[in-house]
Image (tube, grey):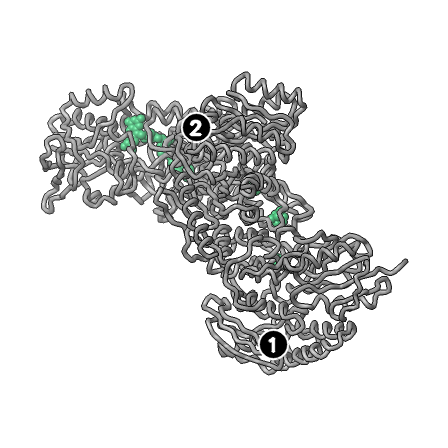
Amino acid sequence: MSKMKVLVRQLNGCNRCAWHLLALESFDSISLIGHSLLGNNDNNERVDAVILTGFATRKDREMLEGFRDRADLIALFGTCPYTGGIFGLANQRGASVLPVEDLIKVDMNIAGCPPGVGTLIETLTKGTSTLMSPLCSTCNREFQKQYLKEIIHTPSWDDSTTCFNNQGLPCSGVVSAECAQRCIDFNTPCRGCVPNVNDSGPGALGYFTSLAGQMDVDTKATEWTTDMLGDKPDEITKGIPDVVGTFFRYTLAHDFKRAGRLPTTGGLCSDIMTGRLIQEAPQIAATIYGSRGISVALTLIEAYENAIGVEPSEKTREIRSELRKIQATWTKLERKPDSKRFAEIVKALKTFAGNEVLSNVYFSGFKVPLKDVEYTFDAYSIREIDWKAASGYAEDENCKVSITVDDRGIIREWSCELR
Amino acid sequence: MFVCHCGENIAGKLDVEEVAEFAAGLPNVEFSTDNLFMCSKQGVELLKEAVRRHKLNRTVVASCSVEQHWPTFARAVEEMGLNPHMHEQVNIREWVSWVTNDWDNATEKAKSAVAAGVKMAALKEPIETQKLDVVKKVMVIGAGVAGLRAAMDLAELGIPVVLVEKEPSIGGHMTMLNKTFPTDECPMCTLSPLLNGVANHPDIEILTLSEVSKVEGSVGNFVVEVTTKPRYVHDNCTSCGRCSEVCPVEFPNEWDMGFGMRKAIYKPYPQAIPSTFTRDKKHCIECGLCEIVCPVQAVDFSMKKEKREFNVGAIVVATGYEQYDPVEITAYHYDHPNIITQLELERMLAPTTLTKGKILRPSDGKVPESVVIIQCVGSRNDQVGNAYCTGVCCMYALKNAGIIKEHLPNTDVYICYIDIRAPGLYYEEYYKKAQEKGIIFIRGRPSNIEPDPYEEKLTVFVEDTFTGEPVEIEADMVILSAGMIAPKGFGKLGGKLGLLRAKEGFAKEYHIKMGPMRSSREGVLLAGTIQGPRDITKTVAHAGAAASAAAQILVKGFLEKRLDTAIVDKDLCIKCLACSTVCNPGAIDVDVDGYAFVNDTACKSCGTCAGACPTGAIQIRNFRDAQLKEEVIGLLEYNRLVGAAQ
Amino acid sequence: MIIAFACENCAQGSANTAGVLRMKYDHRIKIVRVPCAGRVGPRQIIEALNNGADSVAIIGCCFGACHYNDGNLITLRRVKAMKRMFEELGFDPDMVNMYTARAAEGDTIVGDFEDMSAKTDAMLSKEVSNE
Ligand SMILES: Cc1cc2nc3c(=O)[nH]c(=O)nc-3n(C[C@H](O)[C@H](O)[C@H](O)COP(=O)(O)OP(=O)(O)OC[C@H]3O[C@@H](n4cnc5c(N)ncnc54)[C@H](O)[C@@H]3O)c2cc1C
Ligand code: SF4
Ligand code: SF4
Ligand code: SF4
């Protein structure tokens, strides 16, 4: 069988997926014609497949149409090209992040943030995507049929058996498929990077707010003698201060077709970070800052810890410095990207952070015991955190982060200067 | 596609022909026309003929509301061999022509409605009806005259009845009355045959001291759990009364409203049914004398609370009313011994009580020289939250005033009233007769009653609204015509039954004219005063209607249920059970594999589950996400196109 | 355009009554029949807006008087969160509203409609002035 001629193109956003696709080099069945991270050796020839990563904008239309004309098959790798991904959140502030499918016809989607290269290969060889099991069916937590009594922003740390949604913490597992990152294994609710249904955002929102069907909600009397829904803050608005970032974390650009009207803060990443819940911030930063994500997430954690006066334990700091070492290796590797060494980085990340989006890394400590460290979990586990309004600053060799959080736990101001 | 003129109703407000022409150009439309009156015989024939000639498989009529004529056209297409749900109704009268001022806007709005209707029609799915077996048995809750009548009527039709009463005996308020207007008959005499008939009927099971504790299922097949408090006396009691004789505890009898005494082991009144005695655990000092004297060893202190489940096809709620408690109106000093309610007076007048039927001033047993009756206590009174007129108080006030006058011709009897309401056959006549008895009528609602601090006397202050003069009446006794209110504990029972209640607290009827005996829930009927205050005549008629409505569901032996219910797509269902959490009638169970599974009988097709389902796995037939989406697109698309063209 | 999801009990009943009484309201109001306000969820609201509606109204029975018990109360929570969502996107929270009506009184739904169209106008004019 002749080799499949494949072109990998990174559009916009973080390039983590592109890093993963370096691995295509090592597959016998594939001949890699070009790859964004490896410089441009593309001579516009006809190819069997173009694999796209990153999100699209209207500006990319022409380029994408060009790919469509040249390739038999267009495959999307990662959630960004599929739904706009996490960068779709920038649409809140007027950006025009688009799913690739809004611009050209697409043949295959391999969603995930990031997904596994294995799934891509399997899909390419089979020609169709395999059905994925719903995330919930792979989750050990159990749902009890009952209405919510409260809405919370962090899970109960010592409960590993109750469904997050039952606890009152939104989990998008209900609209998602099994994925490569498995946040739920690290006491972290799913935010839906692998949508299992076409309208996962509205689906998850309708689901959770229905379970909140007995929480206090404001109503008011009208002049024409009826009652209507009121505008005052109530348990719903207080409980979910970031509806968009919670339920539409990876699908805003796909689910809601109007550009938001909030003013931009001046940068793509700060547009995404601003408005998010502080409890969710480390993971979001780890995701959107791509190959610098480790550094930014840790620095952000330290900035808020400084602000509220939390002292992480010695062991916690030790593990964090291990993570910074991984960051340093990766940064160095940027000069000469290499798939084997990147695989080592990913492996190390899984050891110290749970997964690639650092689900296990948190304020004050870690959420669940790490597999390959000797210390007892007590030495580096999460401590009591008093979430409050605060401003803080921290820096490391890669970035300077300053952050302001309001009394609802929402990030009001964010700046991150990369060096 | 058929666009109706409805005479001038539609055609006078918008361009019907233009709408029909527009429809003809829509995808899937094979035939489109307009017609003067679609609902007329000719209109329906036109539709049938078109279905035949053009081999149509779906029809859309743009005319009036779904409620009004969907059934007409659905029947027509059914006669042509199509499923009736293949017909889609678009309302361009109530929702367009009648409510839009401007010709062009109305025409445009009608077009978009038609565009949406055509899109929707293309997606409509046939709905089958299913025959469901019903349990031929009825539970009647409350054994007042209403409950008794309903139970009897049903049993006589051969439908077994379980009659649940929370008190130790059956009969309700009617047994407490001394006489009944408008004939002044003895109520026990009129009621006894019914009481005994019910008690002895082979098809009626009576559960006293019992209340409904759980309700599951739905019309045709309810499962009701009834909790029975222990009576501490077994059914072999011969009603000899020896236990009661030896019982050392004595205190006022509730049934006599305190105008009689009873023991801790007792029967509320001699003719009470069932005749078995009851031990009142609260007051009993556990001396055990009754146990010793009972010749048949019926007394048993070890009896326990019991729970039983009944499977019934329908439920009749006949839990009656309560008398308004006048304590709330402080100016009337109801706590004063000489101020009593009409129900208390009914007991005082009864020959079996302490006064032996004599009218005596409660505080000292003096024969009263002046009695004032005050109307509308707790009725027609916004301040206490009851704007309604009880409608019975005027009549019983006339009745009791007359009785006092007959007993004590020299006593002055006053009635202070707002209006005397005596509508209907024999009632106005009854009023006329009362007037002839020398009762003094004063039109005005008394502002307050002042008890004399030194004597037993009372002074009633009232403005006579005929003369405008303030009047002060000296009285030995004041009788308050307290209104009828919904029983206080009804909220809980109503909740279990899933009934809507009117803001006044009574059970809300399905339709005030066409279904006063139906409740908001299918299979649950209302009998008597639980639906609103009324007298015995109307109570009995209402109870009969409730019985026949209950029988209607059951006599055929099956129900026809439209299966436009919820349905689960197992490929999408992730077993999260959000649907089941929000489903109020509890229609969603789990199948053997853990998937959500809809019980068609219980499902009411509300669609709340569909909004809660994260994956869209559960849908309501003909109101699916995909169908609603197309309808919305249909409504908006047309305007978008027109907007773009302009 | 305003999409108004109306429940088949009080809301459609009230709209029919309003028609019979020949009351007038904004022609931009387009009624979509649903069995119960509980049928409406974020999917329907977002789809209407994605397909060009300016705003969405959901009209059900009086709170506490839903003919299916509490469908409208559950949707209340859904809609409240959606209002918050639109606010987070820089839109007017009035882009979606939830009302009640009484079947026997046409003026109740006409009141709802008038309120919704006034709010939509206010919203649209604000948008124009922002541009
Ligand atoms: C002072 C007075 C005088 C009246 N005089 C006349 C008159 O002369 N002529 C006339 O036509 N009407 C008269 N009426 C009206 C008459 O009393 C009522 O119309 C009639 O009694 C109503 O019967 P019912 O069966 O609806 O209610 P009820 O008699 O109240 O019966 C309800 C029954 O349900 C039982 N119950 C309540 N809750 C529960 C529960 N949760 N579970 C199980 N059982 C329960 C109660 O214990 C009771 O036995 C008079 C009313 C008053 C107040
Ligand atoms: S919703 Fe989340 S926590 Fe609940 S079962 Fe699904 S994946 Fe697990
Ligand atoms: S439609 Fe759904 S929520 Fe409503 S009764 Fe049926 S199963 Fe229950
Ligand atoms: S809500 Fe939907 S996914 Fe969840 S159990 Fe019900 S049908 Fe299945």
Of badges 1 and 2, nearer the viewer stands 1
**The one of B237 and B520 positioned closer to us in this rendering:** B520
Percent of width and height locating residue B344: 25, 36
For mark 1, name the chain: A
Percent of width and height locating residue B340: 22, 38
Q: Secondary structure at mark 1?
A: strand
Asked if residue A231 lies left or right of residue A301, the reply is: left
User: Of the numbered discs in the image, which one, if any, rests on residue B515?
Assistant: 2
Residue at 42% from the left image edge and 24% from the top image edge: B544
Say whether residue B167 is visible: no
Q: How many marks?
A: 2
- Per the image, the residue denoted by label 1 is A418
In the picture, the quarter occupied by the C terminus of chain A is bottom right
Res B588 → quadrant: top right
For mark 2, name the chain: B
**The one of B519 and A249 positioned closer to us in this rendering:** A249
Asked if residue A36 lies left or right of residue B66, the reply is: right
The amino acid sitting under disc 2 is: Gly
User: Of the numbered discs in the image, which one, if any, rests on residue A236?
Assistant: none
For the residue with label 2, is its CB less than 8 Å from the closest atom of ligand 1? Answer: no
Percent of width and height locating residue B439: 15, 26
Residue located farthest toward the front when viewing the structure as drawn: B646
In the picture, the quarter occupied by the N terminus of chain A is bottom right
Q: Secondary structure at mark 2?
A: strand
Q: Callout 2 environment at 10 Å: few (<14), some (14 to 19), or many (20+)?
A: some
The amino acid sitting under disc 1 is: Leu
Residue at 52% from the left image edge and 76% from the top image edge: A402
Looking at the rendered structure, whether the residues under marks 1 and 2 are on a common chain is answered as no
Asked if residue A354 lies left or right of residue B559, the reply is: right
Q: Quadrant of ligand 2?
A: bottom right
